[in-house]
Amino acid sequence: MEPFLQNQWLWMIILVPMSLILSFYLYAKVSLPSKGIRSLLIVLRTISLILIFIILINPQIRQKSVSLVYPQLSILLDQSKSIADSTAIAVFMDEWKNDQELNSKFKISWYGFGQEVQPLVSLNFKETQTNIGGAVRNLDRILGQSQGLILAMTDGQQTEGPNYAYYKSKNRPIYPVIVGDTIWPEDIAIQRVTANPVVRKGQAFEVEILINRSGSSNLITTQLEAFQNGRKVKTIPVKFPEGATRQLIQTELFTDKLGYQTFNWVLNSIPAEQITFNNTATLNIEAIDEQRRILLVYNNVHPDIGTLYRGLMADDRTEVIQARPNKALSLLEDVDAVILYQPSQEFSELMGLMANKPINTWIISGPQTQWSEISRIQPNIKKELIGVHDALFTRSNPSFSLFQSPWNQWSGLPPLVSDIGQLSIEVPHQVLLSPMIQNQPLNSVQLGFFEDNGVRWVLWDGIDLWRWRVEAYRQSNAHEAFDSFLGIIAKYLSKHRDKSRLKLDYKAVYTQMAQAEFYVQYLDKTDALDLTANIEMRLTHKLSNQVIVRPLLADNKQYKLNLSDLPVGTYDFTVRVIGGEDQKSGQFEIAPADNEFGQGFAKIQPMRQWAELNQVALRDLSQMSEFKAYLKSQKEFLPREVVTFKNLDFIRWYYALAFLILISALEWFIRKYNGLI
């Protein structure tokens, strides 16, 4: 800019004399009554030309100004109900407002916050929600790039919003000041209760209870009790050794009823405990009768029959009934599933009866299998018969997702024998195992699973399963893993009710004082917990129609989503499995509540963590006089001298234009009066 400005004035230096010379030349030979009139006209014309040049070039003058910029001291005061010692804060506020030296060194701004941050007019301490993280973040955004610091005075009790202990400003230091008694009152609380959402009638099921305590580090003892329909069903002694703050209790409950059931857990309060709302929790489960009866039908004796029988019977909830095809006709009504081992012509009458019944079926095929009989009951299974039987090794499919297999050492197993023709399933299905011959994979199914019109099917192409069980024992010195694999197939096959695989655990109404959390459990096709799925929740605030989409994170035996930062209101929600068809919808409410329960007490641990993150010392109200002296002495907080330059017009264009019109009019009248026009 500087060379350009200099050039403007250079042009003016050149053009002013030129204007004078040009004006003199124009009136030099003009006949006028006197020299005074000639001189006046020359001056007027010169001024007119100069004004024209000024309008065209617009020369500017650079103005320098020097000012003092004082650092911004932003004092953020917690106005929530949990602040008990409001008198001490009022005294602090009066002292700092009346300190002339401090106010001469800083530009001091006072802010109050509860749920939102706003300029502080007067102290009230009536806010029922505290969002420390949101208040500091918003104030930091408002202050922008200005020099200074933030002084945050709070008891550290936050009821909603982002965690303040992890916030650090890029533009200014934050000095936390703790208010209240840092020795928290004795409190013991049930953090969560978890169990498998589906349990078996008549059998004990495992429950985990996480209990937290705060306050002193002394030894405390109490009792945890479980109630069902008002009747006490369990009592557990709870003991916290000195210094312990968390305890995970594992126990068992028992139910002899079917269907959905609720267990209420109550943690007996301890002496001097003031906060008791968090001493209760509920557990919802569904009890089912999972005794399975499976019909194993075969025509010729084979070692595989014994392998299947012993492997399936290893689970005491499974009963295996062995029968020849003619005897099996009368047993179909009393079983959950049927295993057809190498169905042949002798199975004709049985399979004709099965064609008219929706019964879950497991087919094991081999060299003696009559594929035309299979087509009678399931035309979606196709086999290209070559007439050549061979040993087929196996390879597993890593994308199989129906259930988690307890046995996965497939590559080390001996081959199974079957026709090498291609076997295919012409409806949507999942393949766990595919055959290989001479280390070359075949485009065929060896072990596949599918559903057709609500009926579950398992297709296993290959016999000599007994060799697999023997090899599995050789590798692991136990039959359990392979038998469990056979048992999980039996679970898949068992009769099932149409029910959602998503189990939701939530409250119809959440108060923000409580820990608002939404729990989901997802079951695979065998009713086992699946923690590998991607699950998300879509929330719609009914009043504002705001849509929020959040993922749920796997946590121990369930998926969890924290709702504590949601605004007050009613929400419609849909929980769905990404990439699947399972979803559930519902509604809950985040209700306004008085969350400031620990009046007069401060959360020192997150405040200390916040101070360490900002690399400053954590202070309290008693240290404010020393801190004020510290601020006055710090060179980094001294006022800064700021030099600014402004470019001002030498003369505004509209003034120059007005003068030009006036001068030109005067020149015109003089010329007219003297007969030059």
Image (spheres, rainbow, N blue to C red):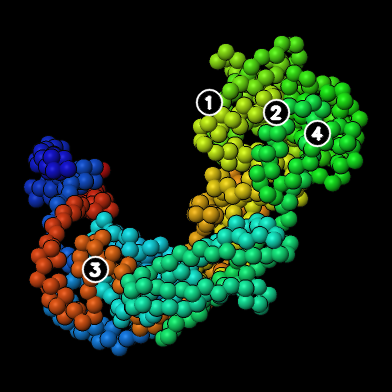
- Residue picked out by circle 3: 175
The image position of residue 271, as x and y in percent, is 43, 85
- Residue picked out by circle 4: 297
Q: Earlier in the sequence, mark 4 or mark 1?
A: 4
- Residue picked out by circle 1: 412
Q: CA distance from mark 1 to mark 3?
A: 64 Å
329, 612: nearer the viewer? 329
Please give the count of numbered marks on the rendered protein: 4
Q: CA distance from mark 3 to mark 2?
A: 78 Å
Query: Which is in the foreground here, disc 3 or disc 2?
Result: 2
The reply to whether callout 1 and callout 2 are in contact (CB within 8 Å) is: no
| Residue depicted at x 87% and y 25% | 346
534 to 356, vertically: above or below: below
Q: Which amino acid type is marked by label 2?
A: Pro
Q: Earlier in the sequence, mark 4 or mark 3?
A: 3
- Marking on residue 303: 2
The reply to whether callout 4 and callout 3 are in contact (CB within 8 Å) is: no
The image position of residue 38, as x and y in percent, is 12, 46
276, 57: nearer the viewer? 276
Q: Which amino acid type is marked by label 1?
A: Gly
Q: Secondary structure at mark 2?
A: helix
Query: Which is in the foreground here, disc 4 or disc 3?
Result: 4
The reply to whether callout 1 and callout 3 are in contact (CB within 8 Å) is: no
Q: Which amino acid type is marked by label 3?
A: Tyr
Q: Earlier in the sequence, mark 1 or mark 3?
A: 3
Q: Is 445 on the left or on the right of 49, as rendered?
A: right
